[in-house]
Amino acid sequence: MSELRDFVADLLERKGAAVEALDPDGLEVLAPAPLQKAMGWPELARLGFGTERTHSAIPIGLEGDWLDRFGALLGDEGRWNEREMRPAVAVPAPSDPERVLDRALDLPNAVWRFQGMTATWTRCLMLAFRYTAVSDEKREGLIWLGFNLGTGAVVSDILARLRPALAQMPDWQAPDPATTLAAGPGWSAATLAARVRPLLDQQVRDSMEAFLRAMRRRLERDRNRVHAYHDDLRSSSLKRLAALVRAEGDRADRRRETLRVEAIEREYRAKLDDLRHNYALRVTVEWVQALDLYMPVQRFDVLIRRRKRERVVRLDWHPLVKTAEPPLCEAGLGLDRVRLVCDDKLHLTEPAGQAPCPSCGKPFCRACSPAACPRCGQASEARAMSVD
C-alpha cells in the first residue's frame, strides 16, 4: 500500500493539509475545513493503509468509495498535460531506410519509393478511456489510444511500449516553443472525434470479448434451466389434460388443467423477461486522461505510385523504441500495415475501405465517398455505423 499512501499524502498536501507519515503504512493528517467536509474526517485524522493499523485509524484501500472521493478532490487536475521526451542516449538514424520501410509498408496495388529522411519533432496524443460494462456481473477496464498528429498514424502499440519508460523518468520536461513549432499543430475536435470513435468502439469490443462469452454461457445455462423446469410442468399438465379428454372427465377439471397450462406459459414468459433484464448489457465509456508527447523522430518521405498518379506521404521512425509506425489510414482503423491505394486521389485505406458495395457490387473508396456508394447511393458501412 506504499504507493497508495504516497499518492494520498501528496494529494492531501496539495489541498492544504499537514501530513506526517507513520509506521507501519499510516498517515497522520491535520486537515483544513474544506478537506474535512469533502472527506468526512475530523480535523486530526489517522489513516491506515495496510493490514496492520491502530484501532483509531481510518482504513483506506482500493475497495469502497475512497478512489471516488480522491478523484473528486482532483477534479480535472492532471487530466491533460504535455511532455517533451528526449532519449537519454542519442540514437542514430536507421542506416538502411528502405529496409525499415519495407517492413512498415505493404501496398498490394501500388509501389513506393523512398524520397528522403529528416530528423524532426512530432506530437503524439495518448488518450486513456475507462469503460464499465454492467450485466449480471460488472467489468471495468482501461483503453489506451495513441495518434501521431504529425502523420495521422495510429501509434497505440508504440505508445504502449513507451509507458513503462514514462513512469521511470523522474524529470517532467515541458516542451519548449521551438519543439512545439517543429511538431506542428494539433487536430480539431471534429477530426479527433472522427478518428477516436470507431477505434475506441473496436478496442472496447475486443477487450470485452472474454466477458461477453462468459455472460452468454451463463445466460444460456439459466435459460435452459428455466425452459427445462417449465417444460416438465407443462408436459405433465398436458398429459393430465389429454387423459381427462380421453376419459371424458369433468368439464371443470379440464378447464382447471387448461388454466394451469396457460399459467405455466405466462410464468415461463415472465422468467424469460427477468433473464433479459438481468443480463441486459449496459456499457459506459468515459475519457480519463490525455497526454501530448513531443518526441524526436526520423521522418521518411515516401512517394506512392498508382497507375499514372503519384503522392508523397510521411511516415515516422521513433528512436525511443527503434520502430517505424504503421502508415496513415484514411478509411478504417489503421491497426495493421496493409493498405490499398485508391485510383482517384490515392487515399491509403484498409482493404475493407475499398471493398465492393454490398448493394450494387461496385468497389469504391470510403475515403473519397464516406457517406454512400457513388453509383447506387447506398449508405456506406461507416456511415451506417455512425447513425446507429
Image (cartoon, helix red, strand yellow):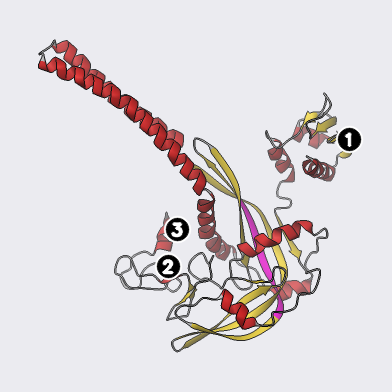
Mark 2 falls on what kind of element? helix
Mark 3 falls on what kind of element? helix
Amino acid type indicated by mark 1: Leu
- Alpha-carbon span between mark 3 and mark 1: 54 Å
Residue 75 got which mark?
Answer: none
Instruction: Name above or below for residue 348 compared with residue 143.
Output: below
- Residue at the image position 81 percent from the left and 64 percent from the top: 173
Query: Which residue matches tag 2?
Result: 352
Q: Position of residue 176 (x, y in %)?
A: 79, 70
Q: Position of residue 194 (x, y in %)?
A: 53, 63
Span highlighted in magenta in the image: 119-129
Q: Position of residue 151 (x, y in %)?
A: 61, 73
Amino acid type indicated by mark 3: Ser
Residue 281 visible: no
Residue 386 got which mark?
Answer: 3
Circle 3 packing at 10 Å, graded few (<14), some (14-19), many (20+), is few
Query: Which residue matches tag 1?
Result: 22
- Alpha-carbon span between mark 2 and mark 1: 60 Å
Amino acid type indicated by mark 2: Ala
Q: Quadrant of the C terminus?
A: bottom left
Mark 1 falls on what kind of element? strand
